[in-house]
Amino acid sequence: MKKLIHYSTIALGIISLISFIADYFIFAELRPKMINFEGISQNHDTLMLVVGIGLLIFLTFCVLSLLRIVQYLKKAKKITPIYSLWLTGSVLCLLFVFSDVALLQDIDKQYKLGLDQPEWSLVYPIMIFQFIAAIIFMVFHLFGFKKENQVEDVVKDSNIFLVAQYIGIICGLSGFILSGLGFFFPSAWNLYVHTIISSIVLLIPYALIVGYWLAIKLKEDISDWYDEKQIQDVGKSSFMTLAISVVFMICLFALNFNNLNGVVSMIWLPLYVFFVLTLFSFGNLYFSKKD
Amino acid sequence: MQKNDQQLTNNLRKYRFEHNEMTQQELANKVGVSRLTIHSIEKGKFAPSIFLALKIADIFKAKVEDIFYLIKNKKNI
């Protein structure tokens, strides 16, 4: 089964790399036509479908790679800053797939309405980043995961705990910043896309790692889920999160008191969720490393 | 509440070195906690439970009070 997943991941990686190269040529043909509002044929629509399928394959490749990285880090002797950076890049790469889809949909919509498409300037850098990330993933799948340090369960548990906090900070901070943008671009804010869909997408990596952690922990007795210092750290972090989030929500309410029907009515929940997630993850990491 | 004029300290580091220079990670694995927990206990930042203290003492075949003991709290002197 492990081998099947390994070879499937490599196959998906190769298809992803080919599809990124194909995307470059597809966009090179489509972009000038769309910018100049020239007609697009049925063939071009088919090409966009190829781009979409390519992104779907890349998304699957990213999820499998991320799970592989987490499994690898689980056995690492220590979570070093390089590992943290690697993990951050992987999570961002996964999240950027959703940005690609959103940007391409916006471009299509604006082309049909006869509007400019400034989103093109974002599509290329994001896809180049994803292409480079896909190459790095492939190198690790082919050569990098072979020599793993076999460490005992306690270290594995501790690593998964730390990795979950890192992912919590990345997802929480990204969601908090994205939700906060609603205050700066209120007219463009869309309850369905920006609040609901974006929040769900940004919570996916965190849900994946917490789900993975739970799957391991459910085999154990509940009293063994954390060691005694971790319980103390989580307690301190929870208290800090509670205190700061209450103050934050009171400030948010007070600052928007005269306009409670405005954009705050759409973003208070994601703001709260992502703020709490960031604080809690940061607190756990800080208290576990502090002493 | 009454101020605590004593603090818990320990010889854990000494005991580890006397037992084939056992690393914090090795000790952590033996007693089933994380390395950071052992590190915090050694630094005196975290007071272990009686259960954990007994497990640590058992590893070194020593009495708990030989490894963990109270000293006057410097802050209150």
Image: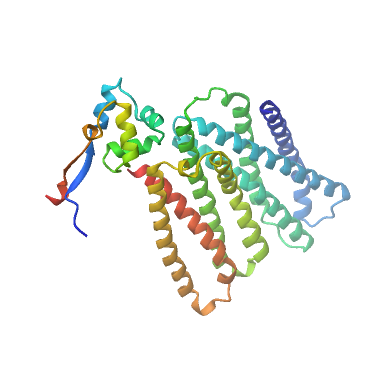
Q: Is residue A139 left or right of residue B48?
A: right
Q: Give the farthest residue toward the top.
A: B20
- Work out whether residue A185 can be spotted: no
Residue A232 position, x and y percent, is: 38, 48
Q: Position of residue A14 (x, y in %)?
A: 71, 31
Asked where in the image residue A132 lies, by quadrant, the reply is top right
Q: Please state which of residues B62 and B70 is positioned toward the viewer in this rendering.
A: B62
Asked if residue A140 lies left or right of residue A169, the reply is: right
Q: Is residue A252 above or below residue B22?
A: below
> Could you tell me residue A44's position as x and y percent?
83, 48
Q: Quadrant of residue A22?
A: top right
Q: Is residue A66 above or below residue B17?
A: below
At 61% from the left edge and 43% from the top edge, which residue is drawn?
A93
Residue at 72 percent of width and 43 percent of height: A55
Whether B3 is drawn above or below B17: the answer is: below
Nearer to me, A224 or A179: A224
